């Protein structure tokens, strides 16, 4: 069974939209939002998937079989899937058989992960792209929790992975430089994205972040879902 975020109508949170972030921004895709996370980011916009101090787990999470989840994904014509969360790799053992069937069925698969858990080899074989979003100090997570050297090195060596960092202010830049230097991650595998949950903040922080990307060779990502729908859920 998979623990999946529950939509207001009680069904698993599976929806058809466009990818809003990263190198595949704008790509039509089906989203599967899994529950549970091993981190606790202060600015997380999906706290309902893991923060049981402020959200009701019984109300926000549904246990669904892989068959039920697959049926929900396949009801859309789209054959591109993004698995997000929460942190999907917390449930990788239950997730792998589902992704294997979808891959055999012609799906293109992207997994969004915080980069602290090493994926198994079988899962690596099924995933076309890893959107790895390691957390910086601005996330509020302690250093040992947010940085797993083994996972960092594995994703660095995968041609199918990009690293997406959320920056809140220019003062985050020295930490970003230090961690990418420590793990020898080339600039063209690094994406910078502003921390923002509303349009005005997103645009304001994007301007100086773009200048940093131009001067240092990093990629830039906006958040299309915020530009189009602010912080609405299930879009």
Image (cartoon, rainbow, N blue to C red):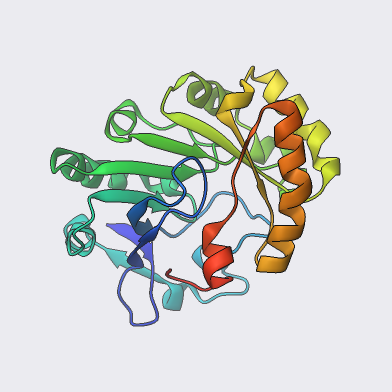
Residue displayed at 40% across by 81% down: 8
Name the side, left or right, on which 112 lies relative to 122. Answer: right
Q: Can you tell which quarter of the image residue 29 is in?
A: bottom left
- Residue 150 is situated, as x and y percent measured from the top left of the image, at 55, 23
Name the side, left or right, on which 177 lies relative to 31. Answer: right
Residue 46 in view, yes or no: no
Residue at the outermost bottom position: 9
Q: Is residue 139 above or below residue 75?
A: above
Name the side, left or right, on which 164 lies relative to 194. Answer: left
Residue displayed at 41% across by 32% down: 119
- Residue 12 is situated, as x and y percent measured from the top left of the image, at 32, 69
**Quadrant of the snapshot with the N terminus:** bottom left
Q: Nearer the viewer, residue 179 or 222?
A: 222
Residue displayed at 44% across by 22% down: 158
Residue at the outermost left position: 105
**Quadrant of the snapshot with the C terminus:** bottom left
Residue 62 in view, yes or no: yes
Q: Nearer the viewer, residue 23 or 159?
A: 23
Count of numbered tags: 0
Q: Is residue 151 above or below residue 192?
A: above
- Residue 9 is situated, as x and y percent measured from the top left of the image, at 34, 82
Q: Is residue 189 above or below residue 226?
A: above
Residue displayed at 16% across by 58% down: 67
């Amino acid at each position: 069974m998979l623990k999946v975020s529950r939509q207001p109508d009680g069904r698993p949170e599976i929806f058809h939209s466009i990818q809003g972030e990263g190198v595949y921004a704008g790509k039509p895709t089906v989203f599967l939002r899994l529950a549970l996370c091993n981190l606790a980011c202060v600015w997380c916009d999906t706290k309902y998937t893991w923060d049981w101090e402020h959200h009701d787990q019984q109300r926000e999470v549904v246990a669904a079989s892989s068959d039920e989840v697959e049926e929900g994904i396949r009801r859309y014509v789209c054959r591109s899937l993004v698995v997000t969360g929460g942190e999907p790799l917390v449930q990788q053992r239950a997730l792998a058989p589902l992704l294997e069937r979808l891959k055999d069925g012609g799906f293109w698969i992207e997994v969004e992960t915080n980069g602290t858990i090493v994926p198994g080899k079988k899962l690596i074989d099924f995933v076309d792209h890893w959107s790895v979003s390691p957390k910086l100090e601005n996330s509020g997570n302690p250093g040992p929790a947010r940085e797993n050297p083994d996972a960092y090195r594995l994703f660095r060596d995968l041609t199918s992975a990009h690293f997406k960092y959320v920056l809140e202010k220019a003062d985050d830049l020295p930490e970003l430089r230090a961690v990418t230097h420590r793990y020898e991650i080339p600039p063209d595998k690094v994406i910078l994205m502003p921390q923002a949950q509303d349009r005005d903040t997103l645009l304001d922080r994007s301007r100086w972040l773009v200048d940093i990307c131009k001067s240092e060779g990093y990629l830039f990502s906006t958040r299309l879902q915020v530009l189009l729908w602010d912080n609405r859920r299930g879009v």
